[in-house]
Amino acid sequence: MYAQPEAVNRPGLGRREIEANVTDRRRARTWSVSLTGTVDLSDTLAITSVTSWDKGRLSFYEDTDGTATGLLEIPYTDRATQFAQDLRLTSDFGGPFNFILGAYFNREKVYNETTFEIGKDIDSDGLPGVTDADCAAGFPLGCLFRNSFDQLKKSYALYSDVSFELTDQLTLRGGLRFTHDKGTQSNFEANAFGPNGVLVMNLIPPSRLDYSQENLSGKVGADYKINPDVMVYGNYSRGYRAPSFNAQAFFDPSELSVAKAEKIDAFELGLKSQFADRRVTLNMAAFRYTYSNQQFINVDPATAAQTLLNIPRSRILGGEAELTVRATDMVTLRAGAGLLDTKIKRGTVSGVDVSGNRLSNAPKLTFTGGVDATVMDGGNGKLSLHGDINYSASQYFEVLNIPRLQQDSYVLLAGHIDWESADGRWNASVWGKNLTNKFYFTSRVDLLAGFGFDYNHVGTPRTYGVTVGMKF
């Protein structure tokens, strides 16, 4: 759902309502098959195979401007298939040393077609009644900008994970992963059409991009058991994300690009503990992530065109804690908190130096809490009550940190009442989410310069329902 400034909404509309001139049904269909099998080669070695196949289709005509005019609409058409195979050898020697050795393959094929329909009901003089000639005369008003492409990505990997119990208290861990990624974006073409579908201009001729990338990454760490109920750990790992193609090039061949591979160096220290006769569980962790060439989508506020770019350097400092208390055999309390401090160390977006800015979708504080209470457990079944609270501090949805696009802190409440029959066959639940009907955003994009509004995704309002299940 989208929300626009008051100026573009007609009187009588609520902030969760829009005037839409496009009401087409969204269609998304997926098919998937997965198969997991394990063969014991001996008492100490086993081979596991995980095979999956997925296919999906999407047809989605979005009323992007959220008004009764055709200022900006975007139809999306996508088709995708994916095949993945994971094969691994696992040991269980019963001694200090064990390992996992594996091989992985993934193949993803995508067809995508996207159209930016800009002012298709406004002619070059700013009047209604558009013809195909108005696209050429009033460019970009009255134009349909369409791109399409085929994309094929393949990923091959060999990986290992080993552990060695040096003493009864100290375990050393490590692993390596070698990855080879290949990608091809072919038949990429972008054109401008008039509102009746007549070709006005070829903007990007048929083009092809390729990448081939190899990476060796790994992890080292150690676990130390202070006693049977308390363990501390520390590890360092190097992460990797393959290069990516820009799917949103529309106006010029220079927009066609391949984002560099993203890398992350991650350090983590943590504690896992249980005490009070294991009725209390406390887990804590502190971490530092350093990104190199972090991949970002940047949206041009004047044209809505999206470009894919790398921010050379950024970092995240953080900590988190989770506490679970079994107050009684019938009541359990839950709480969790997270702290984040993010900073872009070096980078430029839309010609603006964003060094020192916060990363997107990174609230400085988050908190979750809940209670689970069993009020009946006998011959008539089990009845339990559950309540949840979630708090998020303010956050940005883009790295320019535009003040008006900042989401303020908010709290969400949810709950459900569950019943399960004594034999475990039947179950039912009455549930509610966002019980206070809090209004908040899940993303915000600056389109003010070119279209006169900000493009927003609004969080789900209060919802409630009943779920009934049966086990066969």
Image: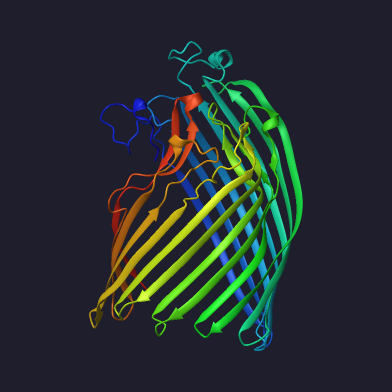
Q: Is residue 303 above or below residue 155?
A: above
- Viewer-closest of 219 and 409: 409
Q: Quadrant of residue 455?
A: top left
Q: Position of residue 62 (x, y in %)?
A: 46, 36
Q: Residue at x 52, y 38 (%)?
A: 76
Is residue 287 left or right of 152 when viewed as pictured?
A: left
Q: Nearer the viewer, residue 235 or 68?
A: 235
Q: Is 312 left or right of 438, judged from the image as shown?
A: right
Percent coordinates x, y for residue 68 in the rendering: 37, 26
Residue 107: x percent and y percent? 67, 55
Q: Is residue 159 visible?
A: no
Q: Quadrant of residue 248?
A: top right
Picture quarter with the N terminus = top left
Q: Name the outermost residue toward the top.
A: 125
- What residue lies at 23% left-to-right and 79% top-to-bottom? 380
**Residue 187 vs residue 259, the one in the foreground:** 259
- Quadrant in the rendering for residue 266: bottom right
Q: Is residue 33 above or below residue 341?
A: below
Quarter of the image with the C terminus in it: bottom left
